[in-house]
Image (spheres, helix red, strand yellow):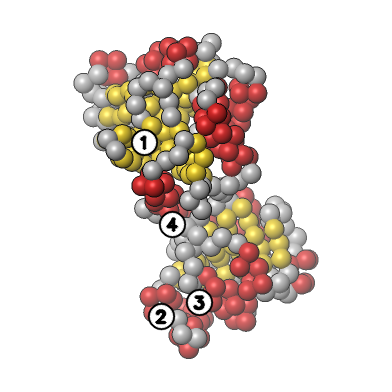
Amino acid sequence: MKELFSKIQDWTNQNKEFAIATVIQTWGSSPRPVGSAMIVSSDMEMAGSVSGGCVEGAVIKSAMPLIEHKSAKRLAFGVADEEAWAVGLSCGGKMQVFAERFLAFDERSEEKAVWEKLKACLTNNKACVLLSRIADGEPHHILVLPDGTSIGKEPAEELVKGGLQAYSERNNQLLEHDNQTYFAQVFPRKSQMLIIGAAHITVDLVDLAAMYGFETIVIDPRGVFSSKTQFNTLPDKIYSEYPAEILPDYILDAYTYAVVLSHDPKIDDNALHLLLPSDVAYIGALGSRRTHAKRVKRLEEAGFSEESINKIHAPIGVDIKAKSPKEIAMSIMGEIIKTKNEFK
């Protein structure tokens, strides 16, 4: 849904009623991942995709009465389904789609509250998890925030825990509770990249990070570097303080990727002492194997365990025999994307 948010806002602002269809489960070679969505208006305009064209026609056909009757329906497609066979699922894949009139048009106060908070979260880059009850008939939603609070009809504690687990795992998934099924759709905040050190590589890395949708935060206490470096793409934030003065203000979780580039042990270690005990998804540090061996010794002397130190990717980046700053930045970005996509 997140990639459709701009269109969703346009249609809701125009009071153009529509249905949303979301992939909730797949088996085999399904063409689109769980969480993929499409929206269909009452006059059959559409945006997004649940199958890259395979079953969109069938979904649109099912969506029309849902808009009219303010309802929801679970749809299944696979090789045994005559319509799905005709449009391309004959390769053996199966999928389930949940279609419903979009909750923004629901007149119930608890559903309105869920939509308003969801809209605020997506607008302001705040994380949340939308729980949708998967059942034919009247739709029902709960919004869970990372701090454990919820919006909507009071949910069971187990459902909130399930939503928080989905968030921590970064994984859209089905939840079962009290003989009912819910779909937990995770809306993470933008992944953030913490870059320690404003070096030549930093300029190119900020360009790439922005291209791939990361929020970029550059930290370098050396004023001449943090204030004088000429960026092609301005970082979202840039600080001229030591990492220990800045990092406590940031959420260091599984949506955070840290790149240590200053090549100054006083600065690099200052950052690593906070990053290593945290839950960040990635820590990479610039330097040769010899430089890293010295870094490891310093960290061991500071009391860090071998397991903790092994979280550091060093030498940093995918091995593409990079030489230039642009190539090194590309290798770092590749390793971060690999880590991001491998996360389970």
- Give the label, 4 or 2, closer to the camera: 2
In the displayed structure, does residue 84 sit left or right of residue 153? left
Q: Are marks 2 and 3 in contact (CB under 8 Å)?
A: no
Q: In the rendering, at what x and y percent does residue 306 appear?
A: 39, 79
Rendering quarter of residue 272:
bottom right
Instruction: Point out residue 311 in the picture as x, y percentages from the top left corner.
Output: 43, 70
Label 1 vs label 2: CA separation? 41 Å
Mark 4 element type: helix
Q: Position of residue 100 (x, y in %)?
A: 44, 23
Marks 4 and 3, the one that precedes in the sequence: 3
On residue 339, which mark appears? 4
Q: Are marks 1 and 3 in contact (CB under 8 Å)?
A: no
Q: Indicate which label's residue lies in the foreground, 2 or 3.
A: 2
Mark in front: 4 vs 3: 4
* Residue 252 in view here: yes
Q: Pick whichever of labels 1 and 2 is earlier in the sequence.
A: 1
In contact (CB < 8 Å): disc 4 and disc 1 = no
Q: CA distance from mark 4 to mark 3?
A: 21 Å
Cα gap from disc 4 to disc 2, whole angstroms: 22 Å
Query: Which residue is rendered at x = 38% and y = 20% of the image?
Result: 137
Q: Nearer the viewer, mark 1 or mark 3?
A: 1
Q: Position of residue 341 (x, y in %)?
A: 42, 50
Report the label total. Answer: 4
